[in-house]
Image: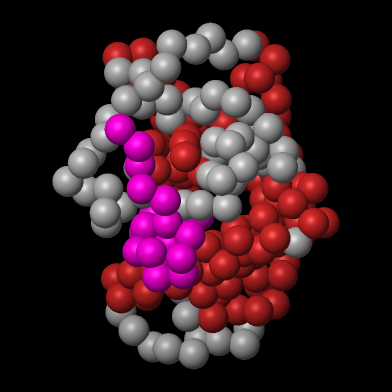
């Protein structure tokens, strides 16, 4: 448990060291983040990580015993796990918006009206664990090693932090291929027409394939 808490602390420090200066340099909007919000998001992250380790980790360990279903190089496994995790994440994300009892938990994440990097971690433990199991399943069934799995989790967590950052970057040449803060900010809009759009965590092609894509305005 100590290693898990230490790793989470290191992750938070690294994300703060990266995104606090970036948000100060090029914010989408000028916002002031209350100390209460910082405490809530940080506290939820630590609680969620612990619950995921105790419950989600145990479930994924059991599922991993069913694999490996593929024998590939480490690099190929990581690439396959990332793509399949993105597909699984898209599917469970849509379910969280469609299934009322799941939405009750996921609504915690959609509560804020202004996004910043810490809001990535305003997640109810049930939301965090269900999503974590869904996106971790491909790596487990592909027989990913602990190092492989850690690489997938770290990349996804870092990218999730980036998506919620209060950044004015448009990245126009890349927005068709990768999700950006503006792309995800539309998903967090409180306008009813936007709530069920732009579900993809990394690859907007999934939204285009499944009819949930909304173009950015402006």
Q: Is residue 87 visible?
A: yes
What residue lies at 46% left-to-right and 52% top-to-bottom?
198
Question: Is 95 located above or below residue 27 in the figure?
Answer: below
Residue 82 visible from this viewpoint: no
Residue 120 position in % (x across, y down): 55, 37
Horizontal side, residue 129 vs residue 191: left or right? right
Is residue 211 part of the magenta span, yes or no? Answer: yes
Q: Is residue 175 above or below residue 138?
A: above
Considering the whole magenta stretch, tell me its main secondary structure: loop
Which segment is the magenta one? 199-218
Quadrant where the image shows the C terminus: top left
Specify the quadrant of the image occupied by residue 3: top right
Q: Residue furthest right?
A: 101
- Farthest residue toward the left? 173
Q: Residue at x 79, y 57 (%)?
A: 100
Q: Is residue 211 left or right of residue 42?
A: left
Please tell me which residue lies in front, 94 or 41.
94
Query: On the rendered image, what quadrant is the N terminus found in?
Result: top right
Residue name at image x 55 percent, y 38 percent? 188
Residue that appears at 66% across and 63% down: 95
Q: Tell which residue pokes out farthest to the front in this image.
A: 193
């Amino acid at each position: 448990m100590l290693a898990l808490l230490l790793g989470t602390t290191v992750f938070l420090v690294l994300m703060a060291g990266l995104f606090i200066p970036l948000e100060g340099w090029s914010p989408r909007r000028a916002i002031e983040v209350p100390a209460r919000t910082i405490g809530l998001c940080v506290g939820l992250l630590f609680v969620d990580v612990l619950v995921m380790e105790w419950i989600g980790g145990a479930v994924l360990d059991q599922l991993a015993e069913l694999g490996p279903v593929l024998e590939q190089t480490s690099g190929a496994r990581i690439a396959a796990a990332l793509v399949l995790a993105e597909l699984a994440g898209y599917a469970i994300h849509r379910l969280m918006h469609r299934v009322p009892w799941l939405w009750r938990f996921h609504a915690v994440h959609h509560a804020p009206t202004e996004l910043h990097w810490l809001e990535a971690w305003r997640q109810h433990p049930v939301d965090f664990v269900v999503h974590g199991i869904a996106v971790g399943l491909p790596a487990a069934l592909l027989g990913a090693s602990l190092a492989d799995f850690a690489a997938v989790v770290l990349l996804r967590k870092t990218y999730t932090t980036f998506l919620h950052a209060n950044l004015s970057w448009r990245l126009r040449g890349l927005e068709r291929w990768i999700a950006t803060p503006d792309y995800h900010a539309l998903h967090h809009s409180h306008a009813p027409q936007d709530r069920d759009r732009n579900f993809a965590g990394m690859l907007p092609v999934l939204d285009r394939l499944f009819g949930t894509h909304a173009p950015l305005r402006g």
